[in-house]
Structure formats: C-alpha cells, structure tokens
Image: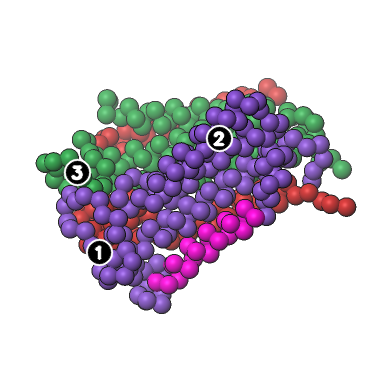
Amino acid sequence: MTEMTKIVKTIANILFPFTVIFGLYVIAHGHLTPGGGFQGGAVVASGCALLLVAYGSHWVMKHIKEKRLAAFESMGAIGFITVALLGIVFSTVFFGNFLTGSGLLFGTTPETGSTLADFNTGGVLPLMNFAVGIKVIAGLFVIILVMAYASSTKEWG
Amino acid sequence: MIEYIPFIAVVCMIFIGLYAAMFRRNLIKIVIGITIIESGVNLFLIILGYREGGIAPIYTSLPPGTTYPDQMVLPVPQALTLTSIVIGVAVLALMLSLVMHIYKKYGTLDVQKIRRLKE
Amino acid sequence: MEQRTIAATLAFTIVAVFFLFSIFFLHPFGQPEQVQMDTYIIENTQNETGTNNGVTSVVFDYRGFDTLGEATILFSAVAGVIMIFRRVKE
C-alpha cells in the first residue's frame, strides 16, 4: 500500500490521539460502565488501522517490526495468567478474587442498589481488563499490518 | 405469530449465508457466506436473553423507580456472545490468509479450477 | 453438473423446512423460562465481586475459564497468520 496525499495525513494526525484516548477510557472503566477489555481493544485497533492506511505499509513496517508487537502481545497474556495464578496463592482457588473486602488497591465494596461510580471498587477485575486490552490491541494490529505488507511486495513466502 | 418475528429473521440470515457458501464459485464469496452464518448465530444468542421492558444489568445510576431482579436483562448470554465474536474474528483472519496464499500459487480464484494438487 | 445441483437444492429445502417448523417450539420473545442462575448473579454481584457491572463480573469472575480459552484462541490465530507470511532470507 502506498502513502496518501498531505490532506489525508494531516487529518489522520489530528484524529489518532482522540481515538486512542477514547479507547483507553473504555478499557479503564470496564467495571462501572458498559465496555471492558475486548471492546476497548477493538476501538484502539481501529485507530491504528487509520494510521496504517494514511501512511502506507512500507513506512510503518520500517519503524515497527512485527517481532516487537508479538512480544507486546505475549506480555499481555503473561500478565493475565499471573493474575489468575496469584489467586491460588492468596485465596486457594484458581481465578480467585483476593482484593475485594480488604483495603489494599481496589478494595472497597459498593453499597447495594443504585450508586454513583466509584473507581476504587472492583477487586482484581481492572488488572485483568488492562491485560486483555493490551493483548487485543497488539493482536489485531499485527494481523492487519502483516496482511497489508504481504500483499504489496512482489516476492514473499 | 408476531412474537416470533426475531427468530424468523435469524433463520433468514442463516439461509442467506448457507446459500452463498453452497452455490457460489468465487472463493471470496464463500468466505463472506461463512461470516454471515456466524453473525446470525451471534444474534440468536442475544435474542434468547431478553426480557420485556428490560434495562441493562448495571447498577451505576439506574433510572429512578426500577425494581432490580425483575426488570433486568439476563447477563449470561451476553458474556457467551462476546467469546463467540472473538472466535469469529480469529477464524476469518486465518481463512483470508489461506485465500491469499492460494491466489499466489494458482493465479485464479475459481473453485472448479483448483481441483488437483500442483507440484 | 445437473445431478449435483438438483441434490444440493433438495438438501437445502429439506433443511429450510425443518428450521422453519422448529421455531414455534421455543419460548416467546421476551419471556424466558429458566432464570434461577441469572437472578442469583444479579442479586449477589455487588457483595461477592465488588463491581457495578453484571456482564463484566460474569466474563471475568464467575466464568473466567472461558476467557482464558478465548485468549488462547487469539494467540494461536496471530501465531498462524505470522507463520503463513514468513519471509525466507537467503
């Protein structure tokens, strides 16, 4: 894919930070409003696809190799498994929620019924939301980048 | 009869996808047919968990005067549909990669010309 | 070619008739029947998990094992796509 004109590049430069901020907002408030890890990851990946269309796949592949993105995705998977295995150490069940009720990091319990949004609640769920969000962002971006680069060169495989 | 209309829409969607996957010759059209079947099945899972006059099962700032377990929609089918959508994305990515590889090797996308193994 | 098209059309119409006749045995749209598990989940979400969102607590806490399987599927899809488009250097 070759690059586009200067007008398209300017508009993509303006729109990309807003999309990333909105996607990170949807990931971070997954335990209070509708959203979560998978949905926010899809929003950020669509912002990255806008950048790929505007600048051409050769330029993006020269600056971001796919080995670094694959390592980024593996970090998200290792984080998810670590949080799940810590449940065995502290609370004797796999995937146990060991942070609700105590006063450590995300520990307060909301009152029953309709409440206002309190970010400090949630237990171990916001950590798992971040891990799955990083995994989905890196995974979808790698798939789009590899397929766009391979369809524009003459010899591969 | 009027309360079965969403189920009839799901059946029509599965049939359009099945027709495109069985009776067409271009490989891209077969892939699109499989994706339409996938969307129809996801719609069916969401339809099963609806309650009449329902509200989303979220406790942050509910509209005033709602009784909670009676008027909320069931949350378990929505969680299973999330997993099914991600599985559909993974299968679509692998199918399109294999179609690109076949086009590179054979030069055509017609199903009835790609029948013997080439050396 | 003629025989194969006739057989495919016959199979298609038989499956269509079976699907259309089995719709009317389901429950009507808007009145689900077995709701004991979902009533327990909606009533005890704020005590046991500590969140306000019912769907996220089902995805990550009550049924977290399915999310582990889904993460594995995403990882294997990315590994398969990278492996197909591998560049062999001389």
Q: CA distance from mark 1 to mark 3?
A: 20 Å
Q: Is residue B116 magenta?
A: no
Callout 2 secondary element? helix
The image quadrant of residue B118 is top right
Q: Which of B35/A40 is in front? A: A40
Callout 3 secondary element? loop
Q: Is residue A78 magenta?
A: yes
Q: Main secondary structure of the magenta part?
A: helix
- Mark 3 or 2, which is nearer the eye? 2
Name the image colouring: by chain
- Residue at the limit of the structure toward the left, as seen here: B65
Q: Which mark is residue A56?
A: none
Chain C drawing hue: red
Q: Which of C78/C51 is in front? A: C51
Which stretch is magenta?
A: A68-87
Q: Do callouts 1 and 3 point to residues on the same chain?
A: no
> Which residue type does callout 2 highlight?
Asn
The image quadrant of residue A92 is bottom left
Per the image, the residue denoted by label 1 is A108
> Which residue type does callout 1 highlight?
Thr
Q: Name the residue located 51 percent from the left edge and 53 percent from the top edge.
A: A134
Determine whether label 2 and label 1 are within 8 Å by CB.
no
The chain coloured purple in the image: A
Q: CA distance from mark 3 to mark 2?
A: 38 Å
Per the image, the residue denoted by label 3 is B62
Q: Name the residue located 60 percent from the left edge and 30 percent from the top edge.
A: A9
Q: Chain ID for label 3?
A: B
Per the image, the residue denoted by label 2 is A13
Residue C58 location, x and y as percent? 34, 55
The chain coloured green in the image: B
Q: Crowdedness of circle 3 by 10 Å Cα count: few (<14), some, many (20+)? A: some
Q: Earlier in the sequence, mark 2 or mark 1?
A: 2
